[in-house]
Image (cartoon, coloured by chain):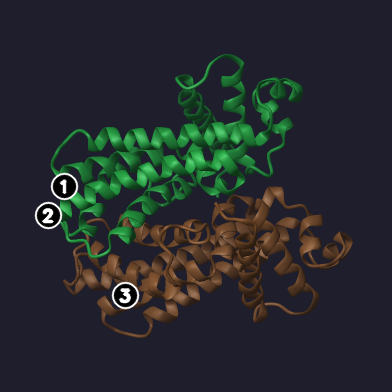
Chain colours: A green, B brown
């Protein structure tokens, strides 16, 4: 149970994280609205956050929101697409740093896990409300998800082919590695008994990933 | 992307799961309302589901809901408390089947993981909207969560003390084992590339749990 001052400290931290996320990904009024929407969806869920709540967090009128975005789904798509691209970028940049599969898995999972701790306020909404998207928008986000999946899978196959990973179940291991990283965004913000920095979580999870493929 | 007939098959499956969950845990009108609330929260999120939506899924009037439950939070608390108790029961019954830590971890994780696949429609809401609860209600659910945590930890300590588990980080390993099981409830329903029965998932996860503690 968080007391009131902890809640407001948490809210300030969340706002700073969201502002820094959008800083390089949008500009002007659109950026203000995307920041407001990200915070509103994280607080109240997609269905619970009205355009009024989004506008309030952006210090704007609801009408002003509609000048820039055609719908709430449109806003969610922008957040979801940018969040997924950022996660993919963290992962793929990290695995590109080495040609050795053990190092690539270690670096990739460390980056992906610490991203999910650091950016938990963004990832939570994006992951748990994905069903909001439909049609072409869903297809675009699903394509990024497949790239994330393929990036992990490729490292696992490389390690298996070189005989350094012992993997009997490629689909299951790929899913599990992504799954345990994504779940960080559920528990990290809530004040768990395990309080660590995002980079410490990255190190811990990369060790555990290597255990999962039996490579130590 | 699910097409319309897949969506409605999924909805029927979800309703059957929710009905069977409440069958032994409530009765009469209260049971009807709890079934409606569980489905409404799973569909729309806690904040997105109005009492009207809850009532519609229970084929009742909103006024009738308030005769039995004082508030939406009251309903969420009942679902959350019952869901957590059921998860604890699955886990603790399973670890009680053996005195050998390797078997206990295997059985416990298999039961806990397959519960999260089978009951994903209930667990999702319960896990991702926990912050809804406050005060005494939060404390009651938090106490059950601590028991779940303590049950896993006790098995890990037993295995470590007997020299069959290699665990450098007891808090982190406990959290991770619970975390990867809970995350099943996020991806299991959504039509992942890995489609398995709950019991197959249980077996897979118990193997992975043993890898995590380096015991094979």
Q: Give the residue drawn at x 87%, y 63%.
A: B61
Question: In this orientation, which residue lies closer to the viewer: A129 or A193?
Answer: A129
> Can residue A207 be seen in the rendering of this structure?
no
> Can residue A48 be seen in the rendering of this structure?
yes
Left or right position of B192 against B139 = left
- Dot 3: element: helix
On the image, the x and y values in percent for residue A139 come to 51, 42
Mark 2 — residue?
A: A164
Considering only vertical position in the picture, is A64 above or below A127?
above
Q: Nearer the viewer, mark 2 or mark 3?
A: 2
Badges 2 and 1: C-beta atoms under 8 Å apart? yes
Q: What label does residue A130 carry, if any? A: none
Mark 3 — residue?
A: B106
On the image, the x and y values in percent for residue B79 come to 64, 65
Left or right position of B147 against B105 = right
Q: Give the residue drawn at x 27%, y 41%.
A: A108
Mark 1 — residue?
A: A102
The quadrant holding residue A103 is top left
Question: Alpha-carbon neighbours of circle 2 within 10 Å: few (<14), some, or many (≥20)?
Answer: some
Question: In this orientation, which residue lies closer to the viewer: B197 or A2?
Answer: B197
Q: Give the residue drawn at x 68%, y 21%.
A: A59
On the image, the x and y values in percent for residue A109 come to 28, 44
Q: Nearer the viewer, mark 3 or mark 1?
A: 1
């Amino acid at each position: 149970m968080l007391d009131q001052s902890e809640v407001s400290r948490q809210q300030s931290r969340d706002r700073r994280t969201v502002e820094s996320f959008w800083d390089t990904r949008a500009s002007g009024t659109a950026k203000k609205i995307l920041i407001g929407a990200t915070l509103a969806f994280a607080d109240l869920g997609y269905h619970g956050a009205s355009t009024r709540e989004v506008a309030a967090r952006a210090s704007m009128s609801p009408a002003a929101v509609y000048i820039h975005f055609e719908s709430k789904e449109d806003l969610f798509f922008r957040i979801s697409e940018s969040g997924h691209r950022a996660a993919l970028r963290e992962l793929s940049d990290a695995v590109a740093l080495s040609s050795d599969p053990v190092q690539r898995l270690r670096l990739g999972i460390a980056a992906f896990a610490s991203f999910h701790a650091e950016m938990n306020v963004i990832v939570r909404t994006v992951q748990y409300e994905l069903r909001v998207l439909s049609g072409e928008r869903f297809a675009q986000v699903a394509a990024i998800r497949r790239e994330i999946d393929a990036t992990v899978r490729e490292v696992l196959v490389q390690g298996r082919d070189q005989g350094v990973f012992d993997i009997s179940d490629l689909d299951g291991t790929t899913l599990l590695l992504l799954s345990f990283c994504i779940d960080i965004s559920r528990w990290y913000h809530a004040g768990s008994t395990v309080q660590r920095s995002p980079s410490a979580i990255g190190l811990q999870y990369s060790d555990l990933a290597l255990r999962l493929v039996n490579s130590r």
